[in-house]
């Protein structure tokens, strides 16, 4: 993640793919460590502008997380918000806003209305809701 923090996204992608290869050879396909790695890879791909593959990887992570966490677990909410941050870049504003709403509901329910994660999702909704006149707040 140091390479990503330094903006070295191509190098970060290479390293993350190596890590995923190791995880895939040592763990079951639905292991939570793989979900975290797929999620991290998705965010790197998003930053590289590889949105379609980023979406695929984030959905893989969510599919695994759904097998390990309750439907209202904050980990899933983070992944929904991350998926929204990918698909909004693909022009899927309405679907992104729905994901942010789902994430917000989980965060409020589990962490409380004054949690910083709620504030972050509120910022995303404030930014993107006006961009899609067919989406209501």
Image (cartoon, grey):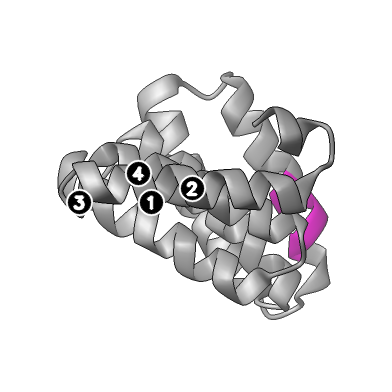
Q: Earlier in the sequence, mark 1 or mark 3?
A: 1
Q: Earlier in the sequence, mark 3 or mark 4?
A: 4
> Label 3 near label 2: C-beta < 8 Å?
no
Q: Is residue 35 above or below residue 135?
A: above
- The CA span between labels 2 and 3 is 18 Å
Category of crowding for the residue at label 1, using alpha-carbon neighbours closer than 10 angstroms: few (below 14), some (14–19), many (at least 20):
few
Name the residue that disc number 2 marks: 18
Q: Nearer the viewer, residue 126 or 10?
A: 10
> Label 3 near label 1: C-beta < 8 Å?
no
State the extent of the magenta-drawn residues as a range: 124-129
Name the spot of residue 89 as percent of width and height, x first. Answer: 74, 68
Does residue 136 appear in the picture of this structure?
no
Name the spot of residue 52 as percent of width and height, x first. Answer: 60, 76
Disc 1 secondary structure class: helix
Q: Nearer the viewer, mark 1 or mark 3?
A: 1
Name the spot of residue 124 as percent of width and height, x first. Answer: 72, 48
Question: Within the magenta stretch, is there residue 125?
Answer: yes
Name the residue that disc number 1 marks: 21
Q: Quadrant of residue 134?
A: bottom right
Question: Within the magenta stretch, is there residue 128?
Answer: yes
Residue occupying image coordinates x 15% and y 49%: 28
> Label 1 near label 2: C-beta < 8 Å?
yes
Category of crowding for the residue at label 4, using alpha-carbon neighbours closer than 10 angstroms: few (below 14), some (14–19), many (at least 20):
few
Q: Nearer the viewer, residue 78 or 6?
A: 6
Name the spot of residue 30 as percent of width and height, x first. Answer: 20, 51
> Label 4 near label 1: C-beta < 8 Å?
yes
Name the residue that disc number 3 marks: 30
> Label 4 near label 3: C-beta < 8 Å?
no
Q: Main secondary structure of the magenta part?
A: helix
> Label 4 near label 2: C-beta < 8 Å?
yes
- The CA span between labels 2 and 1 is 5 Å
Category of crowding for the residue at label 2, using alpha-carbon neighbours closer than 10 angstroms: few (below 14), some (14–19), many (at least 20):
few
């Amino acid at each position: 993640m140091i390479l990503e923090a330094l903006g070295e996204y191509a190098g970060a992608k290479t390293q993350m793919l190596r890590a995923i290869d190791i995880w895939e050879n040592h763990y079951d396909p639905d292991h939570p460590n793989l979900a975290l790695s797929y999620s991290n890879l998705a965010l790197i791909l998003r930053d590289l502008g590889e949105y379609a593959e980023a979406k695929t990887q984030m959905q893989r992570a969510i599919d695994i997380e759904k097998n390990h966490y309750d439907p209202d677990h904050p980990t899933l909410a983070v992944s929904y918000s991350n998926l929204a941050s990918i698909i909004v870049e693909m022009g899927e504003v309405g679907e992104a806003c729905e994901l942010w709403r789902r994430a917000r509901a989980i965060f409020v329910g589990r962490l409380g209305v004054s949690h910083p994660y709620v504030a972050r999702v509120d910022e995303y909704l404030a930014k993107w809701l006006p961009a899609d006149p067919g989406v209501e707040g």
